[in-house]
Image (cartoon, rainbow, N blue to C red):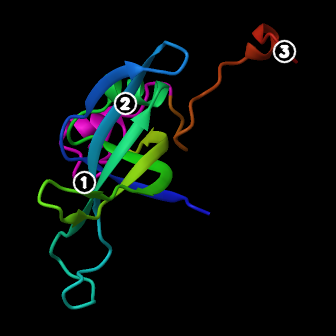
Amino acid sequence: MNKVILMGRLTRDPEVRYTQSRNGDQLAIGRFSIAVDRRFNRSNGQDGNEATADFFNCTAFGRLGEFVEKYLRQGTKIAVSGRIQNDNYTNKNGEKVYSVQIIAEDIEFAESKGASQQGGQGGYQPAASAPAPQNASPDDFMAIPEGIENDLPFK
């Protein structure tokens, strides 16, 4: 089984190109890179305060590539699921280059749009003491007016 799930932030705006598919339609190919935080500092093997991350190159094809082009920007926090693929080649100097890329099969936003626009580094931050609604009862539930049962479309 070849399955990978990563959550991280885009390190740069995605690059999307279009090519002809086998049936003559345009096929979107979206390439992007994400930084995934590590849970521990590799240097001493213990939890550390230093922020360390791994960087993964990802590719999305077709409709998912179009989604990448339309909605993803640098700094966006996403969850990517897909498969790992070797991308080995020989360069101009005759040296073998080994690399790995993630072929995205599903992409989801990992934070709200508002959190990403605020910098998003801390995740969700609740609003500072929102005022209570005018018709709230002492137990913080909204007071239901008398006789509303007759106006409901279902019973």
Viewer-nearest residue: 38 or 141: 38
The residue sitting at 34% across, 33% down in the picture is 30
Nearest the eye: 107 or 120:
107
* Residue stretch in magenta: 111-135
Which residue position holds label 1?
122
| Residue that numbered label 3 is attached to | 154
| Foreground label between 1 and 3 | 1
Q: Quadrant of the N terminus?
A: bottom right
Residue 100 falls inside the magenta stretch: no
Q: Which mark is residue 95?
A: none
* Corner quadrant of residue 118: top left
Which of marks 3 and 1 precedes in the sequence?
A: 1
- Evaluate if marks 1 and 3 touch, with contact meaning CB atoms under 8 Å apart: no
Q: Distance of mark 1 from mark 3, alpha carbons?
A: 43 Å
Residue drawn at 18 percent across, 87 percent down: 43
83 displayed left or right of 149 = left
Q: Between tags 2 and 3, which lies in front? A: 2
Name which residue lies at 43% across and 25% down. 134
Residue of label 2: 29
Q: Is residue 42 left or right of residue 59?
A: left
* Mark 2 residue type: Ile
Which one is earlier in the sequence, the residue at label 2 or at label 3? 2
Q: Position of residue 12 (x, y in %)?
A: 18, 41
Q: Magenta region's main secondary structure?
A: loop
Q: Earlier in the sequence, mark 1 or mark 2?
A: 2
Report the residue that reaches farthest toward the right.
Answer: 155
**Image position of 53 with respect to 134: above or below:** below
Q: Mark 2 and mark 3: span between their CA atoms?
A: 49 Å
Report crowding for label 2: few under 14, some 14 to 19, many 20 or more residues within 10 A (C-alpha). many
